[in-house]
């Protein structure tokens, strides 16, 4: 199974993604993440959640090959709906959510992490939005939580990555770890949080969401609108076809 969930005796839940070779997520996988968080949010035994991945990286984005295997716009629209729902479910889950990122985190992965509350990353982790290279927009709404405004624009236009070390220096990453210590550190942080009163944790989560200056859901829908427009023009489909062929659209 690509998305698995485990809950230990301390009320710490781990949602783990695993889809070799690079943890690109299908539309079904993305809905499965939404469902996992919805179930955990209703589970009275759960006090804190860790979102992580096994394999080469945390997430390589949506599965473009799957998207290009289906004619028409239904799959694209379904992907957009699944991403929006997964991000919102993580963000609105009435429990603290820790992202534990082991390596590359791209596109959809940035949206997942940006929807969490605490970020722990390995020294090998890096974050990027390759959307412009793929004829699309998306998750700049979430990346805005990670970095300063001019860095955001640079990353969107160039599609270049930012390292976990840089994010740690900015205070975005809470704990920077060696790759083999990532889950131990994440569990240690989760255990500290799990000892606190659950009702107070839930109240704090709701309060933090209500005072949040980042309107990610609203802004992400705006980005999706531009993505759908680009697909009507043909830019998105052309870029994704080039990706599947192992090529890159540079000019048009």
Image (cartoon, rainbow, N blue to C red):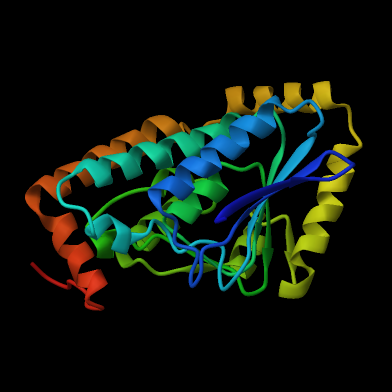
**Whether residue 110 can be seen here:** yes
Residue 145 is left or right of residue 134, and the answer is right
Task: Residue at 71%, 73% (x, y): give it.
Answer: 179
Q: Nearer the viewer, residue 28 or 110?
A: 28
Q: Residue 16: name its quadrant.
A: bottom right
Q: Nearer the viewer, residue 80 or 142?
A: 80
In this view, the residue farthest toward the front is 1
Q: Quadrant of the N terminus?
A: bottom right
Percent of width and height locating residue 145: 53, 46
Task: Residue at 58%, 29% (x, y): give it.
Answer: 92
Residue 243 is left or right of residue 13, and the answer is left
Task: Residue at 64%, 31% (x, y): give it.
Answer: 39
Percent of width and height locating residue 205: 69, 28
Percent of width and height locating residue 14: 72, 49
Vertically, is 118 above or below 240? above
Percent of width and height locating residue 2: 55, 56
In this view, the residue farthest toward the bottom is 246
């Amino acid at each position: 199974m690509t998305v698995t969930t485990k809950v230990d005796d301390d009320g710490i839940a781990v949602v783990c993604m695993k889809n070799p070779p690079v943890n690109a997520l299908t539309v079904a996988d993305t809905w499965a993440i939404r469902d996992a968080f919805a179930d955990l949010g209703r589970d009275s035994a759960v006090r804190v959640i860790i979102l992580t991945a096994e394999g080469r990286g945390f997430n390589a984005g949506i599965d473009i090959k799957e998207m290009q295997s289906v004619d028409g716009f239904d799959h694209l629209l379904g992907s957009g709906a699944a991403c929006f729902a997964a991000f919102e479910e993580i963000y609105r889950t009435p429990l603290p959510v820790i992202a534990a990122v082991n390596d590359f985190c791209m596109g959809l992965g940035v949206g997942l992490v940006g929807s969490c509350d605490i970020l722990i990353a390995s020294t090998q982790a890096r974050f990027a939005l390759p959307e412009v290279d793929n004829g699309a927009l998306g998750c700049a709404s979430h990346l805005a939580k990670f970095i300063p405004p001019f860095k955001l624009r640079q990353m969107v236009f160039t599609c270049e990555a930012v390292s976990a070390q840089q994010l740690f220096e900015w205070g975005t990453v809470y704990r920077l770890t060696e790759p083999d210590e990532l889950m131990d550190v994440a569990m240690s942080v989760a255990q500290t949080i799990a000892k606190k009163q659950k009702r107070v944790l839930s109240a704090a989560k709701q309060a933090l969401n209500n005072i949040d200056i980042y309107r990610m859901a609203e802004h992400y829908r705006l980005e999706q609108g531009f993505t759908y427009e680009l697909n009507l023009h043909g830019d998105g489909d052309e870029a994704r076809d080039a990706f599947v062929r192992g090529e890159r659209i540079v000019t048009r």
